[in-house]
Amino acid sequence: DAGVIQSPRHEVTEMGQEVTLRCKPISGHDYLFWYRQTMMRGLELLIYFNNNVPIDDSGMPEDRFSAKMPNASFSTLKIQPSEPRDSAVYFCASSFTGRGTGELFFGEGSRLTVL
Amino acid sequence: DQQVKQNSPSLSVQEGRISILNCDYTNSMFDYFLWYKKYPAEGPTFLISISSIKDKNEDGRFTVFLNKSAKHLSLHIVPSQPGDSAVYFCAGGEVSNYKLTFGKGTLLTVNP
């Protein structure tokens, strides 16, 4: 069974450009999470969805960041305009109701470099 | 304000010996805790978990201990193997929602 699929795996862009990261969760999972990993802050939660509805976006750093989940099998995280401090690895993860231990299944991540 | 803290950025042990990774938390609302393992260029993968009503959970070479009064948990790996070399993340979560709060991670290196 396919795991969480993220694209692109690597993105290099210039400051001010728009960046769109994509995620396909595991089929049947009703929770989707976007995390960001940096050396300074570790793994931090940006936003999560339940049944395609955003539940908590308190971790989104600022208005330049937005996330959508138009259907159960696709989500995007957009940064516009991008800045060098946005350089990080962005992970998408999914899970499902009833997973008692709260285990999340992560994708391989999208490494973003903003020059 | 870090709710989950892993104060050791790195740890180095010899193959066959015990590895002990530590984690402290401040959020009393956490109902369960998890350890994730991460290799370079891969996403974190679930390793082992423990409910807040237990003080120990064991799975093969991996054991997690929870001390609620001290708000401290630890992961023991016995015996350690070179393939265990990875970054280990500790995380806490609440049953009322499905989000996890992670520590910054500890890089474990197991030397042959």
Image (cartoon, coloured by chain):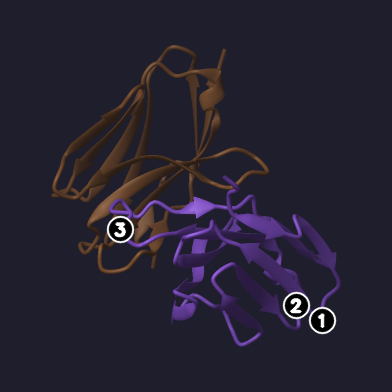
- Of helix, strand and loop, which one carries label 3? loop
Q: How crowded is mark 2: few (under 14 residues within 10 Å), some or many (20 or more)?
A: many
* Residue behind mark 2: A82
* Residue behind mark 1: A16
- Of helix, strand and loop, which one carries label 2? loop
Q: Which chain is brown?
A: B
Report in which chain the residue with disc 2 lies.
A
Residue A39: x and y in percent read: 60, 54
Q: Quadrant location of residue A84?
A: bottom right
Residue A63 got which mark? Answer: none
User: Which residue is at 49% across, 75% downward?
Assistant: A59
Q: What residue type is labelled 3?
A: Gly
Q: What residue type is labelled 2?
A: Ser
- Of helix, strand and loop, which one carries label 1? loop
- In the figure, is residue B99 to the left or right of A44? left
Q: The purple chain is which one?
A: A
Report in which chain the residue with disc 3 lies.
A
- State whether residue B112 is above or below residue A105: above
- Asked if disc 1 and disc 2 are in contact, CB closer than 8 Å, the reply is yes
Residue B104: x and y in percent read: 48, 52
* Residue behind mark 3: A98
- In the figure, is residue A101 to the left or right of A87? left
Mark 1 → mark 2, Cα distance in angstroms: 5 Å
